[in-house]
Amino acid sequence: MRGQEPWDPLEKAIQAAFLEYLLEQVWRNPASRRMAITFLCRLEGWSEVKVGKILGFSAADLEELELGLRPMSREDLEKIVAAQKLPRRRFEEIFLLTHAMVIMMDTGWEMTWQDQLEPLSFPERRALIAADKELQNGGLAELLCEKSREADDPEEAVALAELAFLVLELVKAPVESFRLGDEGFVWGHLGHALQRRGDQAAAEAAFAECIKRWETGDGFESVDRQDRSKAEILQSLVPGLPPYDRNRRLSRSRPPRQEARKGKRR
């Protein structure tokens, strides 16, 4: 054991260098920065108003930050850490933990796909999804849409989009507007796949269904593993899709919440 003692400083230096490298990679991940700031603020019980004052953001800016529509800079996160007077090592532990959570969410459905679904034929995949409640999840539907976009074979792209529809049929969305948003997202991918296959009439019908749900659905702000919003993805796939008007959607949804608050005050 004594012979190993001279190596202790070197081992510590290597560990410190590795930690610094790992943290630098985490800093570069937009989703990890967003989750870290949300976690830290909830840990302290801070209101959106207080967080906005610290960052110099309006309520709308802060909402865009949480949804991934506004970049979360390193400086923003440093301001929160400084305001909390959090020890640096404690912050680094929390940051690495939130990054691990992001990685798990990013890779969880991918691992499910590789381990359980990819080795099967399409009929077998449909049967497994119908039988396994754990697979009846919107996260899997989004991954199947991603696989449809990436598929080299147009027939496979269509089959994957149809599989995403099966998942949605089995998912009980808690909010109607989000169910419509999920359906619109899948319709857009099905239309894109049908267009690639050369079935233009069916593609146009699918695009029409996508656009119809686009007007009333929600959830298009949420982001994928490449930090792109669903709205951005659909705009690249669906011809004639109107520009995404987030302000109109917010104004449509805010009044009921304001009325609810007024009712509580009474």
Image (cartoon, rainbow, N blue to C red):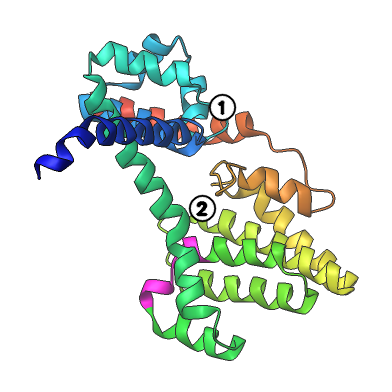
Residue found at the very far front of the displayed protein? 3
Where does residue 86 sit, x and y in percent of width and height? 22, 18
Find residue 209 and report its horizontal and vertical position in percent.
72, 62
Residue 206 position in % (x across, y down): 76, 66
Q: Is residue 17 visible?
A: yes
Q: Nearer the viewer, mark 2 or mark 1?
A: 1
Q: Nearer the viewer, residue 29 or 139?
A: 29
**Residue 70 image label:** 1
Q: Quadrant of the C terminus?
A: top left
Q: Is residue 131 left or right of residue 231?
A: left
Check disc 2 and report the residue beneath it: 178
Under circle 1, the secondary element is: loop
Q: Which mark is residue 120?
A: none
Measured along the vertical axis of the image, is residue 136 above or below residue 258?
below
The residue lying at 46 percent from left, 67 percent from top is 111
**Bounds of the magenta segment:** 133-140
